[in-house]
Image: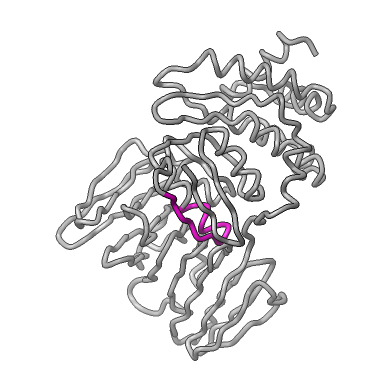
Amino acid sequence: MRKDRLHYLVQQYTTDAATTAERIELQQYLDSGSGQELFADVVSEQAAGHQDASFDSSPYAGLAQEVLQMDKGGLYPSKLRRMRWIAAAAAVLILAISGGIYYLAQKSIEPYALAQTELKNDVQPGRSGAILTLSDGKKVLLDSAANGLIAEQSGARVEHKDGQVLYNKGNNAVAVINTMATPKGKKYQLTLADGTKVWLNAASSISFPTAFTGKDRTVSITGEAYFDVTKNAAKPFRVRVNNMEVEVLGTQFNINAYSDEPLIKTTLLEGAVRVTKGTGSQLLKPGQQAQLDQNDQLTLISDTDAAYEMAWKNNEFNFKYTDLKTVMRQLARWYDLEIVYETNAPVNKEFGGRIPMDASLSLILKVLEKGGVHFRLEGNMLTVLP
């Protein structure tokens, strides 16, 4: 393919202007396996031409991985080809570091060599899994649970199907409280008795009734969860977290309430929710976010980046002027790590870009190291070096 044609296709793709035919043309070119260096050159040149304060690096950072996912028939490629292009995506990641934009087109690093380093002293990514604690104290390890009935509780059926838990309330169900918890390195999906779907991020939990028999539908969470709530105007849905309450009739929203994060963030994607803390209250519209700080001050943010907030549910890390400690907290939850900082570690560095969450830890660390950060991995202890 001529370089000017590839420039055009990349430009069309990163500006969301590509037609189906153009996307297929780019897909077929990358599938050929012969154009990796030219591809890196083109992306590098285009990114370098946009290095200004308003430049959004994410379309370029995720380009190789997103093109990868355009596989015909909606199927993922083979493991070998997937590894090659995950490595390619890492090699063209754009990092925003300490106020400057640094573009990493590492043509001297062979992607296969990057992949091979994963075999030594590495940590594999997290996976689906959770522990369900029933009202009688019985614990069910969902990682190994077979499809079918898990338990019957006061008229409600608890079933496991294709990696998620479903509740069927029955006609005469009496509500009892269950809790689902994900340890570090695990995510899971739950369907409540009213049909509401809940996705739990790593190191999170939700306590919920097996049937919603009262005037409202109330659950409580820790950590991070995404909700797709079944509409029922007569029975409001409420989420309680750290003495804060989110009320909704039917909507899609995300709550990030990790105890080691400085803010509790409620981000609305669709519908309307009201966030209340004490006497403070904020009504959110789609695209807005309510932030509760450590002083219990509630603030409304109108220009939220939904893709950034929802990245975990879409199985990717999305960093946008994200400081190193925030990056490390996310990695610690997903790879089940203990993070240690040596004196003078560069904690003020900032990063931007996207990396798939199914990449191994070694691959992500190699990308971060191109931004001037160094690490030492010993078991599950990751030390950030000066």
- Image quadrant for the N terminus? top right
Residue 145 falls left or right of residue 197: right
Residue 337 on the magenta span: yes
What residue appears at the point 67 percent right and 13 percent down from the top-left corner? 7
Q: Is 351 positioned to the left or the right of 39 in the image?
A: left
Q: Quadrant of residue 85?
A: top right
198, 352: nearer the viewer = 352
Residue 176, x across and y down, in percent: 44, 85
Q: Residue furthest left?
A: 279
Q: Disc count in the image?
A: 0
Say above or below: 17 vs 320. above
Vertical order, 145 against 25 (above or below): below
| Residue drawn 32% across the image and 61% down it | 247
Residue stretch rendered in magenta on the structure: 329-342
Task: Give the colour scheme of this rendering.
Answer: one colour
Residue at image position (14%, 60%) is 279
Residue 314: image x %, image y %?
57, 48
Picture coordinates of residue 220, whole percent (x, y):
38, 70
> In x, y percent, where is residue 202?
52, 61
Left or right side of 146 for 299: left
Residue situated in front as seen by the camera: 258 or 169: 258
- Find out whether residue 191 is within the magenta segment: no
Front residue of 68/115: it is 115
The answer to whether residue 186 is left or right of residue 56 is right
Q: Quadrant of residue 108?
A: top right
Residue drawn at (49%, 87%) of the image: 172
| Above or below: residue 287 compared with residue 28 | below
Q: Nearer the viewer, residue 19 or 357?
A: 357
